[in-house]
Amino acid sequence: MRNIWFVVAAMVFAASGGIACAEDVADPTAVKSEDGKYFDKDGNPTFKVAADGTVDWYTYSGYRRYHSECHVCHGPDGMGSSYAPALKDSLKTMSYADFLGVVASGRKNVSTAQENVMPAFGDNPNVACYMDDLYVYLRARANDAVGRVRPAKHEDKTDAYAKAETSCMGK
Amino acid sequence: MRKVLFATWVGAMAAFAAGPAAANDELNKMAQNPKDWVMPAGNYANTRYSKLNQITAANVGKLQVAWTFSTGVLRGHEGGPLIIGNMMYVHTPFPNKVYALDLSKDNQIVWKYEPKQDPNVIPVMCCDTVNRGVAYGDGKIFLHQADTTLVALDAKTGKVEWTVKNGDPSKGATGTSAPLVVKDKVLIGISGGEFGVQCHVTAYDMKTGKQAWRAFSEGPDDQIKFDPEKTMALGKPVGKDSSLATWQGDQWKIGGGCTWGWMSYDPALNLVYYGSGNPSTWNPKQRPGDNKWSMTIFARDADTGMAKWVYQMTPHDEWDYDGVNEMILTDQTVNGAPRKLLTHFDRNGLGYTLDRVTGELLVADKFDPKVNWTTGVDMNKSSPTYGRPKVVDQYSTDKQGEDHNNKGICPAALGSKDEQPGAYSPDTQLFYVPTNHVCMDYEPFKVSYTAGQPYVGATLSMYPPPGESNMGNFIAWDGKTGKIVWSNKEQFSVWSGALATAGGVVFYGTLEGYLKAVDAKTGKELYKFKTPSGIIGNVTTYEQGGKQYIAVLSGVGGWAGIGLAAGLTDPTAGLGAVGGYAALSNYTALGGAMTVFALPQ
């Protein structure tokens, strides 16, 4: 399990080096792709929705993982709940690096008025192995690229993705 | 150990055969006094019925707010206060404050208790940081904290008398349920079905906090406190290893079957009744077998914890239909014969009536006509599948397999009814049941287990049944015949515990925040008042200074606060966005407050 955390930490570190300002969320347009994964001009993962509504594999996979691991607090479709923020809004201003950091390490916001605590998911392969999937899905939600529905059509899972998934999940 | 348990069991049975065992007379007597509300459900039978009759169907329309009390906590407020003499005990969600108010002195705060708990417990609570209330016994108030600490407080001063830890929150075990005091013991369950906890009910000595017995929901016979020969299921002994044989390998160790619902007790039979929750994970493919004894009604000896009978409602769960909802105990005449009954409205959408002495299954019928995952329960006693629900292939998330999105399953995972307890009036012989009217798409997939991390393995989306816009109903149910007598539509799920009264009035709350009073016979709405926040608490009544009061906690949240706060489905422009599809956040906001009603002077 430890190895997952290191991978995530390394990603955070690398990404932090590249982006200085969390508010400056870049243009999500995909400019290149590699093995079914799309990247924006800064090299951060992003979504790709075709004219007929077909979404990239990461968006679809992120949709599923989100509704397994995240939605019990953050609500369906990233809409928020009575005790956790709407990530479709958070991702409008949160950078890729910050996203990875918060998911991996958790966050606490405890005051006299509220107690919001997010756990660290760095050790949880169901989350840690799918960080980019979650990010891409929520980035698509934040940019209104996918609606409050299960994506109807999606690109296939690539062999490279399947291989990485198997090695990360330790199956 | 086996021998000792066996001897105790025989002893208990002998005592039972000789006549009713000496019950906790203090509490049982106190519960007979309708002026008080001494346990979470008002009485051991969990009927939530009060003999108070000052407020009637004729005058309830004149009800007014008598006083209010802010709890100072924002999250979802489930459960309700206890009233004992002049004192009222009010609990809150995390941080689990308890206030003792003196009703005879203008509701002054006599003492306040606030435990120090590690806030890291918050995110391992599945669905908000709810708590379903405190219990009373032997001059003490018992609180089951979020971090699973059971604490005994001096009811007069709030001073801590003892504490005991019931589970390990770092492994995902949390405390949300209300304790039940039975004789000299305090019984509590545990939450963590979404974290692979091996759940249990545990009895602690009321005086010292020392553990008296612990009965797991799954595991070897000694851990689940089953006697292979004497513990019965549908009229037959369960046999050896009845749980282990239904799990693959060691999966029972992370099997869930949590016990966070309400417990009831029959003093004459000395049996405690409760249900167990979903098997972990939500992906049925990953845990082949019936996964016993998740999704099960248990009848256990209150002194020893030994199981007298069990009935598994949803073998090999494929939809997260926890079996934890309350067991309502009534004595009614069925087919001309007086029967001791247990009635239970399950998340799976079936209303069950069993003989609570033997566990014989008498009725299993849908209490929401939209339920579609099953065509019904096999009631043929000579059938090999007797007592099992017949699952419709199309809605079987196991048959359809991993990575397949199963559409249009009714009810949704939150069930046709969740923890919000129903009520029973002996006057009308009807059950009053707050229900959810929601369907879902469910897609299971592979997950791996990490201690203390969510272990879910399915994605789902929820929406009202096709062609309908109301997501809840408040119904009256005849438990003898399994029929809906009347049904009131509610825009949102009814997530508030009902109260039935001798005044012919039934009360419940709504997610928008209304306290409603309806005619017990017809369901006609007689009164409503919008409280400060959505109601997921249970309605309570008591008498003070010769006057009947109705009390309810508001404070929206809980599981209802997850899906419903966001609106369950896409408010697509074409649908007009109003009505049932609109978000709950358009109607109410967070905030814990108690509102108390009475008739004008």
Image (tube, coloured by chain):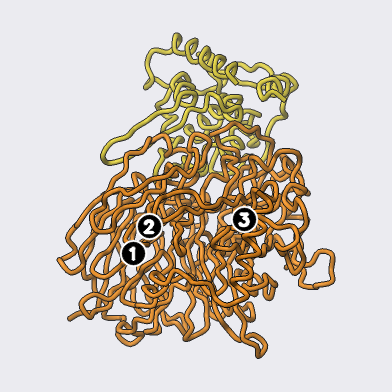
Chain colours: A yellow, B orange
Residue at mark 3: chain: B
Check disc 3: other Cα within 10 Å, few if <14, some if 14-19, many if 20+. Answer: many
Looking at numbered disc 3 in the image, what kind of residue is underneath it?
Answer: Tyr
Check disc 1: other Cα within 10 Å, few if <14, some if 14-19, many if 20+. Answer: many
Residue B581 placed where, x, y %? 48, 57
Tag 3's secondary structure? loop
Closer to the N terminus: mark 3 or mark 1? 1
Tag 2's secondary structure? loop
Q: CA distance from mark 3 to mark 1?
A: 30 Å
Residue at mark 1: chain: B
Residue B308 placed where, x, y %? 65, 64
Q: Nearer the viewer, residue B122 or B522?
A: B122
Mark number displayed over residue B82:
1
Contact between labelled residues 1 and 3, with CB atoms less than 8 Å apart: no
Q: Which residue is mark 3?
A: B321
Q: How many marks?
A: 3
Q: Using the image, determine if residue B128 lies above or below residue B227.
A: above
Contact between labelled residues 2 and 1, with CB atoms less than 8 Å apart: yes
Nearer the observer: mark 3 or 2; the answer is 2
The residue positioned 39% from the left and 60% from the top of the image is: B135
Q: Nearer the viewer, residue B478 or B342?
A: B342
Nearer the observer: mark 3 or 1; the answer is 1
Q: CA distance from mark 3 to mark 2?
A: 26 Å
Q: Which residue is mark 2?
A: B134
Q: Residue furthest left?
A: B105
